[in-house]
Image (tube, rainbow, N blue to C red):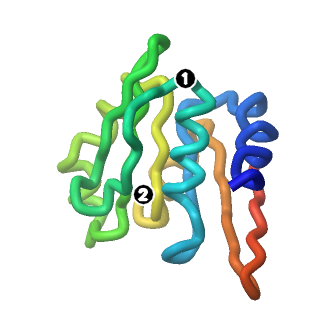
């Protein structure tokens, strides 16, 4: 747990864009990272995986954060059907887990990416 706090403390000052893509296998820690990130940003909301809801909304004094899970999306039309563009336009931050189906649409939008890999119970986090 202390490691996640350290990761967030390093990444938070570098966040310049309102889109953050989270990549990693099941159980890599994407939602756990999000919990730490939101806590460090000042949110007292309970953070949970948006797997079934597809999008969760969290509140901060500076604005809203939307946390997406696109894992179950079958095509790009389904992503547009949830109104993702409106969320992106009106968010302090959009965190998108399993973004691969939508990644091509983000090519021209400034965004960050975090890739979490797990090998032999060690995690590596790459931020760009």
Q: Residue at x 26, y 72 (%)?
A: 74
Q: What is the secondary structure assignment of the residue under circle 2?
A: loop
Which mark, by number, is residue 102?
Answer: 2
The extreme top residue here reads 61
Question: Comparing marks 1 and 2, which lies closer to the viewer?
Answer: 1
Total count of labels:
2
Quarter assignment of residue 19: top right
Q: Residue at x 48, y 65 (%)?
A: 100
- Residue linked to disc 1: 42
Q: Where is the N terminus found, in terms of image quarters?
A: bottom right
Residue 109 screen position, x and y as percent: 56, 38
The extreme front residue here reads 2
Q: Residue at x 78, y 67 (%)?
A: 124
Residue 47 screen position, x and y as percent: 41, 44
The extreme left residue here reads 81
Q: What is the secondary structure assignment of the residue under circle 1?
A: loop
- For label 1, the crowd category at 10 Å Cα-Cα, with few meaning under 14, some 14 to 19 and many 20 or more, is few
- For label 2, the crowd category at 10 Å Cα-Cα, with few meaning under 14, some 14 to 19 and many 20 or more, is some
Q: Is residue 102 above or below residue 34?
A: below
65 or 102, nearer to the observer: 65
Q: Is residue 49 above or below residue 13?
A: below
Q: Is residue 61 above or below residue 6?
A: above
């Amino acid at each position: 747990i202390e490691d996640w706090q350290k990761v967030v403390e390093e990444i938070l000052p570098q966040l310049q864009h309102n889109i953050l893509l989270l990549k990693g296998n099941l159980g890599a820690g994407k939602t756990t990272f999000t919990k730490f990130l939101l806590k460090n940003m000042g949110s007292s909301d309970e953070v949970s995986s948006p797997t079934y809801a597809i999008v969760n909304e969290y509140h901060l004094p500076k604005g809203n954060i939307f946390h997406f899970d696109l894992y179950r999306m079958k095509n790009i039309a389904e992503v547009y059907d949830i109104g993702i563009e409106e969320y992106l336009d009106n968010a302090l931050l959009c965190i998108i887990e399993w973004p691969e189906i939508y990644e091509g649409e983000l090519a021209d939008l400034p965004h960050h990416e975090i890739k979490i890999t797990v090998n032999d119970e060690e995690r590596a986090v790459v931020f760009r």
